[in-house]
Amino acid sequence: MTNGFLETWHQSAVTTAGLFWMAFWAFGLGYLISSMIQVFVTRERMKQSMGETGAKSVGLGAFFGFISSSCSFAALSTTRALFTKGAGLIPSLAFLLASTNLVVELGIVIAVFLGWQFVVGEYAGGVLLILLMWLLVRLTFPKKLVEKARETAREQESGEDDSDIPDWKTLIRSAEGWRKVANRYVMEWGMVWKDVTVGFTVAGIIAAFVPKSFFQALFVGSGQGQDPAFWQILVHTLIGPVAAFFTFIGSMGNIPLAAVLFGNGVSFAGIMAFIFSDLVVFPVLRIQAKYYGWRMALYILGVFLAILIATALVLHYGFAALGLLPDSASAQSVTDRDFFSVDYTMFLNIAFAAVSAVFLLWKWRTAGFGALTGGQWSERILFVLALAAFGWLGLGLLVPPLIG
């Protein structure tokens, strides 16, 4: 009994380490691209380009979101800044949705773990989310609530301004510009390392310890080798956001867990709803309430829940009509994968480990490091959970020598 638990624990730790090994280069590439864009395309330029609601403003909001960071918490801060400077609610929410669903690094990680259908679903779904949000907010626009939320947000605004940053052509040719890229790159990792650590550890634990029968009971109709009924697909899209809400993990940390769900037969709609749910988790709701007040935060939550469920359903049946639905029966179990071998992943990981080390050293020598835990209580909880995850992984990897 004890040996069986220890062996499963070891399998869980190896799975977590293997999942991160598969994804490290993708994180590095994505954050390098994101850091360059954030340094050379400043927030002040975005503010000057976005106005009240209109096709141009919504399009610019989505475009600026596309070229911005995928970290939900950074996106929330930038969205507040745009909103307080006069951008309409719809362009601001378009920016927020695009910055967490249309960014490069998320697509790369999804491709690594889930395949091209999910990448297409992520980007097509991101556009559909924005269009449905535009329609729903136009139909339900709470004018007085929006005005009150803008006043509340302006009280919270720190007054940060980057209008004096040099032209990007000058900046990209300077050492100072690349120092800023290095700082931004390290900050990106600083914002997500706790989510990633906890998310990958949870994915490994679930993959190793949770039986397939549990997923079949939770996601009704999954893994049965037949086409689920509409009501079963709908249940999947409802359970996906609930599962994401209680994981407290951001979009990047949720992808390996999504791979576990897919390997256990959860429908395409359920997986997409789960991935789209990074903006309806409790820490995000709490931050939105701090920025705009609880009424506005709950309004945004309701809008996002409605559009992500609708988008997941449209994607599922659209892909089904085109014969493009991925077959979960052919998905390789996460615990059965061969993670460590001499291939392109190893060489890319070595390259981005070198880049990360150089950037880390550069930031340390020029700017030092801030607090590891962050000021918010949710960040402190994640910090403790991340430390516990490292302890779980370290002991789990040592299990064979201990029982041998």
Image: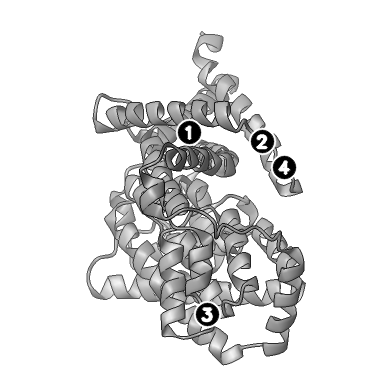
Residue position for label 2: 370
Residue drawn at the location 39% of the way across and 30% of the way down: 355
- What residue is shown with label 1? 16
In this view of the protein, can residue 127 be seen by the observer? yes
Question: Is the residue marked by circle 3 packed among few (<14), some (14-19), or many (20+) residues within 10 Å?
Answer: many
Q: Is residue 308 visible?
A: no
Disc 1 secondary structure class: helix
Per the image, the residue denoted by label 4 is: 381
Q: State which tag comes first along the sequence, 4 or 2.
A: 2
Q: Distance from label 3 to label 1 (Cα)?
A: 44 Å
Q: Amino acid at mark 3?
A: Gly
**Are the residues at dot 4 and dot 3 in contact (C-beta closer than 8 Å)?**
no
Circle 4 — which element?
Answer: helix
Q: Position of residue 105 (x, y in %)?
A: 39, 50
Q: Which residue type does callout 2 highlight?
A: Gly
Whether label 3 touches label 1, CB < 8 Å: no
Identify the amino acid type marked 4: Ile
